[in-house]
Image (cartoon, rainbow, N blue to C red):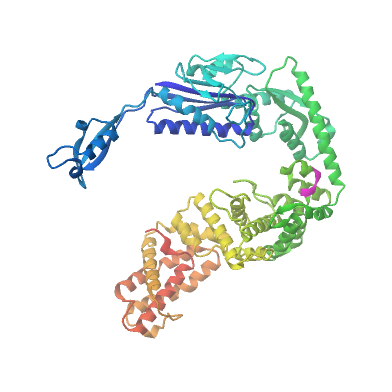
Amino acid sequence: METLLLEIGTEEMPAGYIQPALDALASELIRRLNVARIDHGAARTHGTPRRLAVVIEAVAKHQKPVTEKIVGPPERVALDAEGRFTLAAQKFAEKVGLPIDRLSMVDTERGRYLCALVSDKGVRTKDFLLQILPEVILEMPFPKTMRWSDLNISFARPIQSVLALLGKAVIPFALGQRIKSGRFAWGHRFMYHKRVQIQEAGSYTERLRSARVIVSIDERKQMVREEIAAAAAALGGKILPDEALINTVTQLVEIPFASGGRFNKEFLELPGEILITSMREHQKYFAVVNDAGQLMPCFVAVNNTRAKDMALVAKGHERVLRARLSDAQFFYRSDLQQKMDAWNERLKGVLFQAQLGTMHAKSQRVEKVITQLADLAAPQLKSLAVRAAQLCKADLVSQVVFEFPNLQGIMGRTYAAAAGEHPDVAAAIEEHYRPTYSGGPLPKTLPGALLAIADKLDTICGCFSVGLIPTGASDPYALRRQGIGIVQIMLAHRLTFSLQSAIDFSLKGFHPTDPKATAEAVLSFIQQRIAHLLAEEGFAKDVIAAAVSVSTDNIPYVWQRVAALQNLRGAPDFEPLAIAFKRAVNILRKNNEAIPDAPEPELFENPSEGFLYEAYRSVKEKVAQQLAAGDPESALRIIAGLRGPVDRFFEDVLVMADEQTLRRNRLALLQAIALLFGSIADFSKISV
């Protein structure tokens, strides 16, 4: 067993390219080894801005041998009347590369056939790797690739070197005309700008460490944490937590050295989000806070080099940041001089989607929808919700949001508060984008929740109206996330208004070719999101299907019905009831004649009919009361009391009697029972 090492040395790559490329590289190498029958151990990836590396432990030196049985022509074709091999047998022997006397007859299900046992001893792993490694490298996926020099190859950035070892041996191959693999890697560009010879794959990380390169991403990330914490402490504060920035910075350096700096206190007049975003997005600097969590006029930068005079480095960072914050301060002060209502007019020049118009048109549609939703959910907050809808997109034309698009909503809240708008209006403007990612925070205020639903419904209904429906992995407008957001918000705020009505309100702002079909498609789309969330909560798929197929109009109530079904599934009466319901539904489905609206007791012949009917009458109102009270579990327990009468009915009564009047009356009784069950769930979808 040997250790396989492959390192691709490049010019500096974007931070976001590195981890996906490493994952793809390791996955493809493992796949190829598996297909080639080469045993191996675990794979580890290492990466810096200037190198992508994979180490695979315990790689076998040789492919596993394999013997394959190849069946040829049948005996009657392979042998002539005298039992000699025919021309067909000779051709088969040539095809499999064996002497004809090595072939034999075998018995199969179809009779006796000529057979060859072909052995493949395999090749040396090193010989296999030198053939496939160039393909693996040049087929690596990147968001963008480039060509350089006169080489007829492309990669994320120009390739400078290739290190390829199996144990101590070089795996020799070439990329293009001039890039040849070897046992050399480059050290740190500024602190050790020399080639490093790697004698064996197992010494890779330590040899690069001596060349001032920390190839382990996890180790480098821990060093970043320690460096920035120490730099912040030296400034009298601590780092504002920012895991995403730590991940980014880790991929920007080969060995981290942090330096702290300060900026003018006057910049603290800016909203904290502007300061933090300006430092993070433009400069990749960390914000510093005091023990109370308040921003300090300080920052921490992570450098790729330790300079002789780190104070001089810090002054350079301070000078660059001063210019950035001065720009942000100018943008913010200029925005405060503007009226948000005036910004709305400028939204006429901001495109939402080519087929769906401008942001101005979208905000007007959202205002109309939220007017209806507020009437249903919170009439007392209607004026606040409508005002928030009027201003929710205004900040898109502000100078700060133009510079920092990820501050949309946040700046809207800030500007609305500065203009004296109601706190709930300001909060709703920010909250209507939530959740912005899976598991992200939801709107806290009710106006914010209603505005978020109206805005997301507008996007979904608009896209469905013009045929922009998610397919497979393609969802360019994040409609699935927005659908899930609607469901989560309605659950969090216990919003029980009709989902179908909300969809109908929203679709009035568009002109789909088939409004009814579009409404059904949108409802089905959101139902799928409900089922997805329920499955993530651990509910059984058949229980979800049983509840969702009945109704999803009241989303919090759907959740209650699913939970009730799941809780009662283990009860002794549950499975027999589900079986009885399925039987009733199957009988009703096969029936083609008209069924009366209700059974007539005077037509009952068998006592079991009357027994079931009286039991049904005794629980019908109780079930309705429990459902109206929002207690489906109690309703289910009441329905479970019908098990005995239902079982007795099916044992004693022939539903499909020859006499039409009897048959139709019994079908009417079954239909009443089925409708009672169906008010909670479609039990026919329960697996029993």
Q: Is residue 397 magenta?
A: yes
Q: Position of residue 308 (x, y in %)?
A: 73, 14
Name which residue lies at 77% across and 39% down.
Answer: 274
Quarter of the image for residue 273 reads: top right
Name which residue lies at 55% across and 25% down.
Answer: 176
Quarter of the image for residue 321 reads: top right
Question: Is residue 24 at least partly visible in the picture?
Answer: yes
Q: Position of residue 352 (x, y in %)?
A: 71, 53
Q: Nearer the viewer, residue 127 or 342?
A: 127
* Quadrant of the snapshot with the N terminus: top left
For the magenta stretch, what is the residue range? Answer: 395-399
Q: Is residue 525 magenta?
A: no
Q: Nearer the viewer, residue 440 or 340?
A: 340
Q: Nearer the viewer, residue 635 or 318?
A: 318
Our reading of the magenta stretch's main secondary structure is helix
- The count of marks equals 0
Residue situated furthest right in the rendering: 337
Q: Position of residue 642 (x, y in %)?
A: 39, 69
**Does 348 appear above or below 28?**
below
Quarter of the image for residue 244 reads: top right
Q: In the displayed structure, does residue 336 sit left or right of residue 598? A: right
Q: In the displayed structure, does residue 511 sit left or right of residue 566? A: right
Q: Position of residue 612 (x, y in %)?
A: 38, 75
Question: Is residue 613 at least partly visible in the picture?
Answer: no
Name which residue lies at 76% across and 54% down.
Answer: 425
Q: In the displayed structure, does residue 84 sit left or right of residue 334? A: left
Residue situated furthest front in the rendering: 87
